[in-house]
Amino acid sequence: MEINILSFGKIAEFITINRLDTDEIFDTDGLKQQLEKTYPQLKEIKYKLALNKQIVQKNIELLPGDVVAIMPPFSGG
Amino acid sequence: MNERYSRQVILNGFGSMGQDKIANAKVLVIGVGGLGCPALQYLAAAGVGTLGLIDGDVVSLSNLHRQLLFTTNDIGKLKIDVATENLTALNPEVSLKPYPFFITQINILNILKEYDVIIDGTDNFETRYLINDACVLLKKPLIFAAVSAYEGQLAIFNIFDENGIITNYRDIFPIPPASGEIPNCSENGVIGVLPGIIGTMQAAEAIKLLTGIGKPLINKLLNYNLLQQSFYEIELSPGSVNSYEIPKDETSFLNAKFGFSKNKETYRVIEIDIDELQNINKENDTILIDVREVYEIPQLNQENYKQFPMSNFEKLVNENLVQTNIVLICQHGIRSLAAAEQLHEKYGTAKNIYSLKGGIARWKHFFTSQK
């Protein structure tokens, strides 16, 4: 299954891929685990996922071609 | 028709009704920085009836690449003073309410109650969560924005959409990041034009909310990328029930922990009138500190009086004052209040710190008759 990845802010500095091809990820929780394993920096910061432009508030099943955005908070003004 | 607003009043959907709505509105801009400056400029120009602005900081050289309300000559001056002067010149029809201090857990609720729409233009998470929670408690529409490097975020919280859904910042990020977890502008940098764009969008969203035109960004988070010149909009929904807690009433709000390490008592400054000043002056342990610049008139000739101009405020902060009662004065009582807040941070409850409300201008007779 192929998932599209969009990273924002600081996260884009270490998650530089925009596609993830995997047979082991089925849902957003699984994706989080996988990302945090591959990119340990992600575990150190707060972030939020959006699936197909909808904020992820609970575990959701992933389908091929889904777009997952990974967003950190910004504080600057 | 007022010629000043003629170009927006002739717009379809805006009209004199839209202008009236703006003229009757009260908008508060918290933080007069990269986001706050452009938001204030456009809102003042558009004719927002009452515009509050709050910031305790002074203008510094590193502000100038993005905070275009200020010029090189303003370095060291209180942001609120300069902003008020320039915004008044831009549109004298707007009633400006300057608050020359930082927003705190103690003062936020009373200030927010006066306004219809709140704009967050601050630069740190502690204050952002404070503003978010206060807006939830008081049910105030919040136009949130934040920037980092080349990217920005923008959203409107605390308004029910057509489906009856309402969200706040904690529905995206329930818990504030630890300090150092996410870099701020001074650590990470920011391109000057970015807060100009995002702050201007905050003003645009405020005008849309007030007039009812277009589709405001309610329950949406807009991500903007300046390098790609791209927008990515996320639909928001409430987080799960137990993911965060917001104080339910004012007492629990005042007792909540927002990560402010300083004792809240230290934020209490007392504003006094001339009678109280005279009473305090009778005590031997009192010093009167004038924070006006040396060229400002009238020059005073008081007992226990010392001048510490605001342009060299560091000197006052570094001075170890021996007196217990410190009364700060300036021309209109605005700079002195800001100075008093700062001294409070230094001395806490060890000293009684006062600011003369209305300043020398209001009590001119008293000060000039003393000569």
Image (cartoon, rainbow, N blue to C red):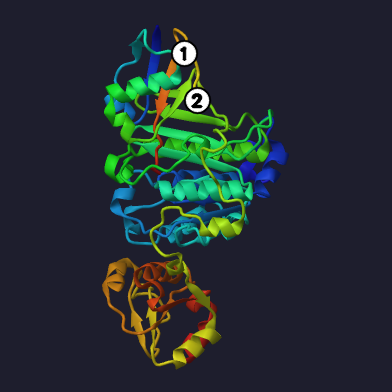
Chain ID for label 2?
A
Give the camera-side residue of B56 and B172: B172
Is residue B7 in sight in this rendering? no
Q: Position of residue B132 (x, y in %)?
A: 52, 46
Q: Position of residue B222 (x, y in %)?
A: 49, 29
Q: Find residue B162 and report its image quarter.
A: top right
Does dot 1 land on a helix, a strand or a loop?
A: loop
Is residue B181 in sight in this rendering? yes
Q: Say the numbered circle drawn on residue A62.
A: 1
Q: Position of residue B215 (x, y in %)?
A: 62, 29
Vertical position of residue A25 compared to residue B62: above or below: above
- Judging by the rendered image, the residue that carries numbered circle 2 is A56
Quadrant in the picture for the N terminus of chain B:
top right
* Image position of B177 (left or right of B17): left
Q: CA distance from mark 1 to mark 2?
A: 12 Å
Do callouts 1 and 2 point to residues on the same chain? Answer: yes
For marks 1 and 2 on the same chain, the one whose residue lies earlier in the sequence: 2
Q: Residue at x 53, y 81 (%)?
A: B363
Mark 1 neighbour density, 10 Å: few (under 14) some (14–19) many (20 or more): many
Chain ID for label 1?
A
Q: Amino acid at mark 1?
A: Leu
Quadrant in the picture for the C terminus of chain B:
bottom left
Does dot 2 land on a helix, a strand or a loop?
A: loop
Q: Position of residue B301 (x, y in %)?
A: 39, 88
Q: Residue at x 27, y 43 (%)?
A: B187
Vertical position of residue B118 compared to residue B198: above or below: below
Q: Amino acid at mark 2?
A: Val
Give the camera-side residue of B304 and B144: B144
